[in-house]
Structures are given as structure tokens and as C-alpha cells.
Image: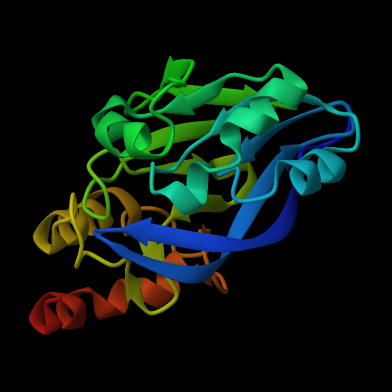
Amino acid sequence: MTAARIDHLVTSGTFSLDGGTWDVDNNVWIIGDDTEAIVIDAAHDADAIAAALGGRRLRAIVCTHAHNDHIDAAPALAEATGAPILLHPDDLPLWKRTHPDRAPDGELADGATLTVAGTDLTVLHTPGHAPGAVCLYAPGLRTVFTGDTLFQGGPGATGRSFSHFPTIVDSIRDRLLTLPPDTEVRTGHGDGTTIGTEAPHLEEWISRGH
């Protein structure tokens, strides 16, 4: 069997919350082999994501959280592929702001395991940027997909509704910085990093606040 690989797509659109709208570029991650895959964060462009899948069976559309820029293309991608949309239930209030008439198909639970192409991804509930934010840890790929929880240089933003800085710091400290230092961090926006690169800066983030 072909080993699982990680494909990366960048899509562009807007993020809207609390009355503001911003242009954003989002990372879309596809994990799988030549026959099946899962998508992490179906952002902005369902057609581009479907094209990147290239006819592979899509097992699931995983949402790291329910800010509109991470889920706006999820229903269209689900419609095109038949794949279920999975979201942590704590983010349903955010989800309904974007998709009031289309619920997710299943729930992401802390500690649950998703398997694709022989590769396990463990769900880590990491609230702070959003109440139902999750990361997906794939030890076999030495990778964690962090959505907007952890970026190169620090935590995700916590200045808007449904977010809380002390909570995101706790999530990063307790759930992410405990991973092996060589774990690659693949983020929701921008360039990646490693756990070992970010771990020494925890106290600095706490003192800096947000």
C-alpha cells in the first residue's frame, strides 16, 4: 500500500466576524494515498480542492474550527464528494453563522482517532481561538495540523468573539508543546514551524498577553 502523503493547497477568500471582513489566504491540507484522503479545512474553493483530490475517495472533511474562512467551501465539497463534514460541537454556534441551514454530519471528540491510508490522526481539543478548535496529530507523519491554534511565532488570534487568550495558551502548553520537538506544525495560514521551535517561547507569549 502506498504510504500516506500530505498535499498542500492555498486558497483565497475572506474572513468575517464581529462586523469586519478581511482578505485571507488559507492552507488546505489533504492527507491520503492514491485512492483515499481526508481534507483538513475546506476553505474558499471547493472546485480547487476537488481538483487536488484527483478522483480519490474523500473519507471526511475535517474542520479545525468554524470560522467562516475555514468552512465556507465545506458544504459544496461534501455535496460533490459525498464526504461527511466533521466539527467539534463546541463550535456549532460559529458554524451556524455561516451555514444556518446545513449542519455538520458528525462530531469531533477529543482523543478520537481518524484513520486514512493507514495513517492515524488523533483529535486534540485545543480551545482558545474558538471554543471547538481542534488540532490533528499524526505521529506516523511527525506532523500536527494546528488550524489557527498555533502559528510560526505564537498563538492564534484571540481578540474577537468566542476567543480567549489564557485558554489558548493552556491548550498550546498542555496539548501541543508536549508533542515531540521534531513534530512539524502545519498551520491554517502562512508558513509552518516545529514544536521544538515554538516551545521555548511559551513564557514570552504569556507575559506578552494579547
Quadrant of the image for the C terminus? bottom left
In-front residue for pair 138/209: 209
Position of 94 compared to 60: left or right? left
**How are the residues colored?**
rainbow
Exactly how many numbered labels are in the figure?
Answer: 0
Position of 88 compared to 193: left or right? left
Position of 66 compared to 172: left or right? right
The quarter holding residue 60 reads top right
In-front residue for pair 117/85: 85
Residue sitting at x 43%, y 21%? 101
Residue 149 visible from this viewpoint: no
Please, is residue 32 above or below residue 15 in the view? above
Residue sitting at x 18%, y 49%? 162
In-front residue for pair 11/199: 11
Residue 138 percent location from the top left of the image: 55, 41
Please, is residue 146 above or below residue 82 in the view? below
Quadrant of the image for the N terminus? top right
Residue 158 visible from this viewpoint: yes
Residue 104 percent location from the top left of the image: 45, 21
Residue sitting at x 83%, y 34%? 33
Residue 81 percent location from the top left of the image: 75, 22
Please, is residue 105 above or below residue 98 in the view? above
Residue 188 percent location from the top left of the image: 51, 59
